[in-house]
Each structure stands twice: as C-alpha cells, then as structure tokens.
Amino acid sequence: MTPDKPPLPQLFKGIALFTPGGDLIYCIDPSKQGRWHLHLCATLQEILDLPEPPHFLVPCYTATIDHWLDPRTQQIRTFAEAYPVVMRYQPVLNAIFGTGDLVWQSAPWQEGLCDRMVLTSYRSSFPQLWEDHDLILRLDPTEAVLYYQETTAQQLQLDTQGYVLRLFIAGHSPGTERILENLHELLEKYLGQPYTLKVIDVFTHPELAEANQVTATPTLVKVWPQPIRRIAGNLEHADKILQMLGAKEKY
C-alpha cells in the first residue's frame, strides 16, 4: 500500500515504528515536542485490535530522523538512525521521509531490552504484530490521541487475562538481575494466575516513566487488575508486594 505523502516541512523530527511482520506506522512532527512512541504504539493497538499498546517494540523496531538547522552555518542537517532489525527498510524510510538515497546509521542494539528471545515471547499474545497487513500509515499530529492512560477498564477486562505488571528500572546491573530473579520466583510461587511482566528502563524510556507516574526506581506497577497500584524502592519484602497485588492471603 502506497502512503499518502503530504508536503514535508523543512525542519521536523520523524519517528517510524515497524512491527515484526513488516507493517509501518510513522509520524512527522515539525514541533519536535510530541511523545510519539506512545502515540504510535497506541494507534497500533487500536487499528490491529491488540490487548494493549505494544511498547515492547520500542526501541528495537524504531527508526528516527531529525532535520535541524545548524545555527553556525544556517544549513539544514540530517541525523537518521535505525535499529538493526529495521535497517533493511532504508528504501521505505527514505521514501516516507523524502531523504533520497540517504544511508541511515545503525543504532546500538539494546541488550536486555532488545533480546530476540524476549521479543519473540510476546508472539502468542500479540500474533497480529507478526502478520503482514501491508500497512504504511502516517499519523497526523493534529489527530493523535494518547490512549496509553485512557484504556478503559472494560476493554482491559475483555482483552486481558491474569496480571499485567511493569517493572521500572534505571539501567541494567547485577542488582537489577537479582530483583528480576526474586520477583519471578515470588510471582511463580504465590500469584496463582497468569501474568505479564515487562521491564522498562527509565533511562531509555523516560516518557513511559512519566506516563506511569514513576519518580523512583525500582518501581513495580500493577496495571491490571484494577485499581492500578505501585510499589517503589525496596522490592525484597514479599509480603508488601503480594499485598499490593491483592494476593497476600496466598503468602
């Protein structure tokens, strides 16, 4: 499907988000102020009927471009980079962003966040993302709606089984690995229901920390079942975690 190509501004920031199946959704933002990763994920959720926004695609399946004015030379410069798994789409990126035969830089692979086995683990819950719908969609800044915090309880109840948890960390370290191991052990032993645990690095995704009202790390957020609850700081107290999850009686 060939995308419509409205006139491009001289100066803009562009963000493209691909799916593992090859679909593409992107935006061109002259103001350079939008939180577009959230908008793109929310729009994918809507049009592909996903249970929740696929934030795990970020940053691994993204490409970004910035047309900016060099104040010294008054010349327009371009910075463009894409993550390794989407580098093969450079001709498509150049077509949608009007950059001719530009050679894109390869962004460093984010080990831990972009682990292939971890990403593949989402396939059973988000099978639509691994299908090719021949989708190339430009998201208009004037029509974008931030669905991230507006997903209704009814929709979550219909689409989500078990617990949806997010663990916010600040970088990867032996301490982080220990927290993950302890948390997985606790959830497997006492939760008694299916759960999805997503790890989010606030250094890489500050916009997700802001959207989830996370001000300290580590923070564990229970997104579902509602009400939303969070616990920050010391995650070694099993009873407090289970109380936050509403599962203390099993402990």
Image: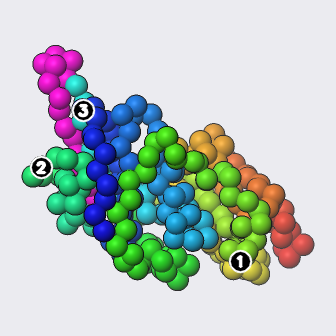
Q: Is residue 180 left or right of residue 238?
A: left
Q: Secondary structure at mark 1?
A: loop
Quadrant location, the C terminus = bottom right
Verify whether residue 77 appears in magenta: yes
Q: Nearest to the eye among marks 3 and 1: give it.
A: 3
Q: CA distance from mark 3 to mark 1?
A: 46 Å
Instruction: Tell which circle, 3 or 1, labels the residue nearer the N-terminal end.
Output: 3
**Foreground pick, 68 / 25:** 25
Which amino acid type is marked by label 3?
Gln
Which amino acid type is marked by label 1?
Gln
Read off the magenta span.
70-83
Mark 1, other Cα within 10 Å: few <14 / some 14–19 / many ≥20: some
Q: Secondary structure at mark 3?
A: loop
Q: Is residue 164 left or right of residue 19?
A: right
Residue 161's disc is 1
Q: Nearest to the eye among marks 1 and 2: give it.
A: 2
**Residue extending furthest left?**
101
Q: Residue at x 84, y 62 (%)?
A: 243
Verify whether residue 46 appears in magenta: no
Which amino acid type is marked by label 2?
Gly
Residue 100's disc is 2
Q: Is residue 206 visible?
A: no
**Position of 131 relative to 149 (above/below):** below
Quadrant location, the N terminus = bottom left
- Mark 3 highlights which residue? 10
Instruction: Tell which circle, 3 or 2, labels the residue nearer the N-terminal end.
Output: 3
Q: Position of residue 125 (x, y in %)?
A: 56, 78
Query: How does the figure colour the protein chain or chains?
Result: rainbow
Q: Position of residue 43 (x, y in %)?
A: 51, 58
Q: Quadrant of residue 45?
A: bottom right
Instruction: Tell which circle, 1 or 2, labels the residue nearer the N-terminal end.
Output: 2
Q: Is residue 250 left or right of residue 65?
A: right
